[in-house]
Image (cartoon, helix red, strand yellow):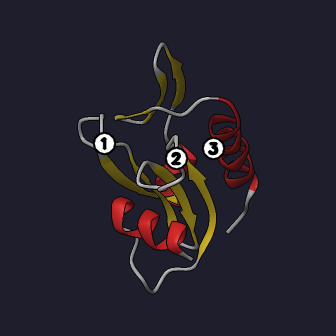
Amino acid sequence: MVKERNARAAAEVPTDQIAYILFDFTVFGSTRDCLVATEWGISYHQANENPNSFSMSYENLKYSVIANTFMGTKIGRFKAKLTGASRDFLQALQARLKGLRY
């Protein structure tokens, strides 16, 4: 519960949204650097980035270019220090979103 509360505060996730997945990028588990997937979309926070936080709806994620970079991942116009499982998750999520029909 503390980890989720820290991540929500850092990534500015509204309290009325259900958090489905939380990636913690901190060394000691504070979750202040994180990626949170909610019912609306994704929210990200990394203290050493500029901007250090962003949120993106699933609709925008669906059409954003996700590119590997030297220091992580670029999602549309945002830079994120995502590697390994978190980047794989986003790419798989985007593939699923592209396959959905409304």
Secondary structure under badge 3?
helix
Label 1–label 2 contact, CB within 8 A:
no
Where is residue 78? Give x, y as percent: 36, 37
Q: Does dot 1 land on a helix, a strand or a loop?
A: loop
Q: Nearer the viewer, residue 1 or 28?
A: 28
Outermost residue toward the left in this view = 50
Q: Quadrant of residue 15?
A: bottom left
Q: At 34% from the left edge and 35% from the top edge, which residue is drawn?
A: 77
Q: Position of residue 62 (x, y in %)?
A: 57, 49
Q: Determine which residue is flagged by label 1.
A: 47
Q: Earlier in the sequence, mark 3 or mark 1?
A: 1
Specify the quadrant that holds the N terminus. bottom right
Q: CA distance from mark 1 to mark 2?
A: 15 Å
Provide the residue designation for mark 3: 90
Residue 19: x and y in percent read: 58, 72
Residue 66 screen position, x and y as percent = 54, 32
Front in this rendered view, residue 26 or 68: 26
N-terminal of the pair, mark 1 or mark 2, is: 2
Q: Quadrant of residue 86?
A: top right
